[in-house]
Amino acid sequence: MSEATLESQPKKDTKSATTERARNIAQGSNAGVPDFSKLVADHRAYFLSGVTRSAEWRESQLRALRSMVKDHAEDFYAALWSDLRRNRIDADLIDVKYTTSEIDHVLAHLRRWMKPVPISTPLQLAPSHAEVRFDPLGVGLIIGTWNYPLMLTLSPLVAAIAAGNCAVIKPSEVSAATAEAVARFIPQYLDRKAFSVVLGAVPETTALLEQPWDHIFFTGGTTVAKIVMTAAAKNLTPVVLELGGKNPTIVHSSANLRVAARRIAFGRWINTGQTCTAPDYVLVFKDVAAEFLKHLKETLIEFYGEDPQKSPDLGRIVSTHHFDRLIKLLDSGTIFHGGQHDRNERFIAPTVLTNVSPDSPAMQEEIFGPILPVLEVDSIQEVIQFVNARPCPLGLYVFSEDSSVTEQILSSTSSGDADVNDCTLQPTIHDLPFGGVGNSGMGKYHGEWGFRAYSNARGVLSHSTKIDIGGLRYPPYDHNRILREIVMPS
């Protein structure tokens, strides 16, 4: 996710708004905000009691969270409609069913993840035993985001619970209805001594960042991520930063163009393009560009109709601020399809831009909306150079029936993750690590990767006292120096 504000603005933001917002956070705009030190201290005391370490407690909390999501699915559907006009099917599949399926996956594997991993030891240290234990970190802060305000807030919480941590959750107030629902229901289901929800905006987030956390999970943009990381550095607190970027989508000459068009359209325009893993721009080979664009236009008409404003499957832009930001990007190229918009409804039709310059505004920031620039390229090398000349994206997508083409692109570029012959689906695989690299973030989560992100991998070496060969390593070292090197290898 590109430049962003922390709470009152969506993750993807213009530089001016982001800079102003970041300045407020950096200056500590927290006058009149409660002191959260007691809240954190109470959670830490509970963590230190050892209650959260047991598998039984973790499983009970995960089951309670799953019950919360299922019991109040209708409330969450209504909240997501209010915040984003997200249709019921998308809300059910993405926010509700994905969250519950992730919990089910964690419950199925948690006890295995919790087991120490044995490590072989050298003969010189026999008899001994080595293992890696996964200890919970303590009390974490989870800063949620607005575009998937249920799933992207609860998914880090699932990982925190699985690893045996306490947490304070700060939802984004941009999706106010969902934030309020999360704040209302979590205390009804989860252990209140372990988990709290804080509502608010920049002042509250600023005050929270002043606390000595054991872990911070932030979903947002690079500008605020640096502020979060600076705050974390004061206490040497580990962070996961789930950011994003301009995700390139390559359509090779060998691609199944109709399938590529349909899958790209789905990935780009789900949630009205307000998705951190969405294709941000297309690099299509010139010899198939016209045919690809034809399929893409036909697909958009099939998906959303001739008048997409009437489509029940197309949401709205989260705020007028972002509506205005996106409208300015329409001048970055020729409108091949779409372009209709209605500020009163915060509606922008699915729009395809052609004749887009790499230096145009639409290519300088993550779009995070229903606009897709399509640029033509001549060669694989041009694709690689184009991608590598820009910050590392969160996702990279390659459409090709030639595996050598796919391998050449993947082995010559970098991204947080990738999807071949589809897009945006890689986060749905619970065992795949999800997260960025470089400007698109740091740290991975989902499944066991989330469990480990919230754990301290603690190496433990245990020895027997029944046999002591230490005489070879204890001073005085009067003779036989080679024995010292054998027993204490470098």
Image (cartoon, grey):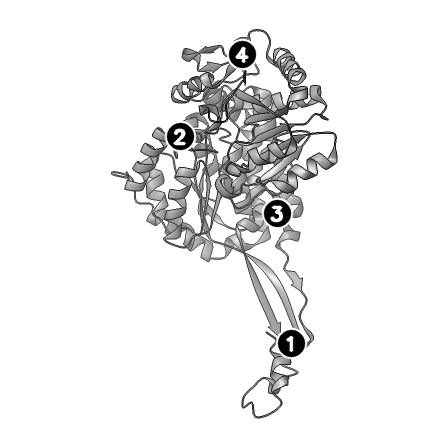
Please tell me in which quadrant of the rendered image residue 467 appears: bottom right
Type of amino acid under label 2: Glu
| SS for callout 4 | loop
Task: Give the numbered dot on residue 125.
Answer: 1
Residue extending furthest toward the left: 31
Point out the tag, 4 or 1, that comes first from the N-terminus: 1
Residue corresponding to mark 4: 338
**Distance between mark 4 and mark 1 Cα atoms:** 70 Å
Give the crowd class for mark 2: few <14, some 14-19, many >=20 residues within 10 Å. many
Task: Give the numbered dot on residue 448.
Answer: 3
Q: Tell me, yes or no, whether the two marked residues, 3 and 1, touch with CB atoms within 8 Å.
A: no
Q: Residue 452 versus residue 279: which sits nearer the camera?
A: 279
Point out the tag, 3 or 1, that comes first from the N-terminus: 1
Query: Which residue is pictured at 46% across the width and 51% down the height?
Result: 238
Type of amino acid under label 1: Leu
| SS for callout 3 | helix
| SS for callout 2 | helix
Type of amino acid under label 4: Gly
Point out the tag, 3 or 4, that comes first from the N-terminus: 4
Residue 98 x %, y %: 60, 33
Give the crowd class for mark 3: few <14, some 14-19, many >=20 residues within 10 Å. many
Residue extending furthest toward the top: 306
Disc nearest the viewer among 4 and 1:
4
Point out the tag, 4 or 2, that comes first from the N-terminus: 2
Task: Give the numbered dot on residue 173.
Answer: 2
